[in-house]
Amino acid sequence: MNIYDLVNPMDFRYYGAEPGFFERLQPYVSETGFFEYQRRVETALILAFRELAWCSSKHADEILSAFNSVTAAEVYEEERHTGHIVRALVNCVARKVSAEAGNYIHLFLTSNDTTDTATSLRFQELLRDVVLPDLLDLLETLIRSAEQHADTPQIGRTHGQHAVPITFGFAIALYVDRLGGRIRMLEASRQNLRGKIAGAVGAYNALSLQLPRAAVLFEKLVLSYLGMQPAPGSIASQIVQPEFITDMGYAIQSCFSVLANLADDIRHLCRSEIAEVQEEQSADAVGSSTMPHKVNPKNFENIKSLWKAYMPRMTTLFMDQISEHQRDLTNSASQRFLPELLTAFDYCTVRLNRAMRSVRVNQQAMVRNLGANKEQIVAEPLYILLALQGCPNAYERVRKLAREARERGKAIMELVRQDPELRGYISKMRPEQQQVLEDPAKYTGQSSSRALAVCEHWRRETEQLRAYLAQEKAALSSLKPDRFERHYNKLRNVEQGEPLPRAFCPAEDRRLFVEHCKQEASEKSSGR
């Protein structure tokens, strides 16, 4: 198939157009990748059967081998006959094993036990392995820029008008803090993605035929093989409670909005009449088919444009929270497009990082723009200092002076010096306060110190999160059945009569679960 025969621009222009980007995301967002995650859910079930001796090792090995050999193409071909994608997967595997082994495939499960758990698992790992590391890379780029320009004066702008001075590093540090907060929210939503092994209506009906007392523990056991947890109350309908995915989608969209806002701000600073930054582009880059001189901030424009395309998808996620009774099918088609959102978001993260690394700051233009209106922007420090000296109605007096200065084409301070009363107040000010009135470029407040403090904080947070993500991946990639011996023992004991507390729900904090896995792996490697 030719990539340019596809309908979706994400495939032929963005995701599919960059081989490196495609290779990193394909195992998570593609349909082939999704079948791999469904396979992992179904095989976790078989591993639990084998450990509980519900099926023989021979039958378990048959099934595990068959799952490893089934392809997405086979399943979709089978679905043409069944009209049901999960039953098609089960049929394809069943054909490769003995009839006795075939009885155990998908036993006790409903389709959404497999698909919803696989969806949560793939997004957990996509965020951990790709999206969050890419966001941390962008955050580090912004930190370096903010630190480099912590003392570079720039005019602040509100309502598109000159306000009072800041530093360019302070402006970027605000995005460091905003993006860092969104990354933290996204990681929290990732940790809270859940799975289920609870059957057709979520009440463990089928499992209860085998485990009348401990079905909820079996769910916990199978999900633990995958590094996952059930809902906090160990309760569901046919589907996993939709709020977990909705929260993840909101965290992504909120983070995406920060990226779009930053891209838009940088794009405005590239305007010819402002020219405070410029994106360096290759010598062969073309900005217009007819104007040879054009150099456009197209990377920043494209990021905002893609945000516009995908931001409305949040409405669909909210609508997908509604599912009648124990489940209807109205979210089936719409949720299939969710991987596109994560793909577009990560694409924009990578592209914005690349663009920000190529931005050239024009400090001369910043000085020029700040100086162009310095006779007006002195108004705020003048009013504040006059008020501190006890000048009556200081704000109103300076407002009228500013208006008069504009009408007469004069500087505010020139009019101030002509007023004996105001001169008297100014003479009482400290030297550094008078210097601000003479040179408003010094009126940057704590821009520099706040920029550096924010960068130091988020550099530390970035290092900690990056280390945790790597440690989680290592800990969960080496899970073995003996890790869950206490789960098996608990399950057997409950089935044999050990009482469960009335309010018992076996779900635990996933991060705590991962910490236990890390600790046990460390103890085994040290021989303790």
Image (cartoon, rainbow, N blue to C red):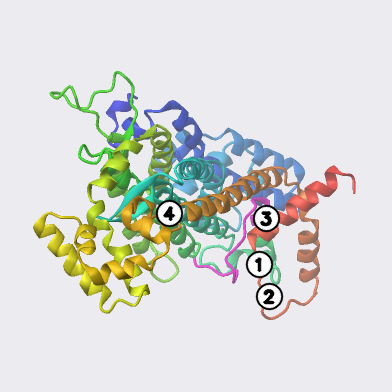
Q: Locate residue 266: give its quadrant.
A: top left
- Indicate which disc, 4 or 3, sits on the residue closer to the N terminus: 4
Q: Amino acid at mark 1?
A: Val
Q: CA distance from mark 1 to mark 3?
A: 12 Å
The reply to whether the magenta stretch includes residue 260 is no
Closer to the camera, 153 or 241?
A: 153
Are the residues flagged by discs 2 and 4 in contact, CB closer than 8 Å?
A: no
- Indicate which disc, 1 or 3, sits on the residue closer to the N terminus: 1
Instruction: Tell me if residue 67 can be seen.
Output: yes
Query: Tag 1, which secondary structure?
Result: helix
Q: Residue at x 36, y 74 (%)?
A: 389
Q: CA distance from mark 1 to mark 2?
A: 9 Å
Q: CA distance from mark 1 to mark 4?
A: 46 Å
Are the residues flagged by discs 4 and 3 in contact, CB closer than 8 Å?
A: no
Q: Which residue is mark 2?
A: 504
Closer to the camera, 14 or 201?
A: 14
Are the residues flagged by discs 1 and 2 in contact, CB closer than 8 Å?
A: yes
Determine which of the numbered discs, if any, sits on residue 301 in the image. Answer: none
- Indicate which disc, 2 or 4, sits on the residue closer to the N terminus: 4
Q: Amino acid at mark 4?
A: Leu
Instruction: Name the mark nearer the viewer: 1 or 2.
Output: 2
Q: Residue at x 65, y 36 (%)?
A: 65
- Number of other residues with Cα within 10 Å of mark 2, as a class: few under 14, some 14 to 19, many 20 or more: few
Are the residues flagged by discs 1 and 3 in contact, CB closer than 8 Å?
A: no
Q: Which residue is mark 3?
A: 224
Q: Which residue is mark 4?
A: 174
- Residue 3 is situated, as x and y percent measured from the top left of the image, at 33, 27
Q: CA distance from mark 4 to mark 3?
A: 39 Å
Where does the magenta region start and end? Answer: 221-237
Q: Which residue is mark 1?
A: 216
- Number of other residues with Cα within 10 Å of mark 3, as a class: few under 14, some 14 to 19, many 20 or more: many
Q: Amino acid at mark 2?
A: Phe
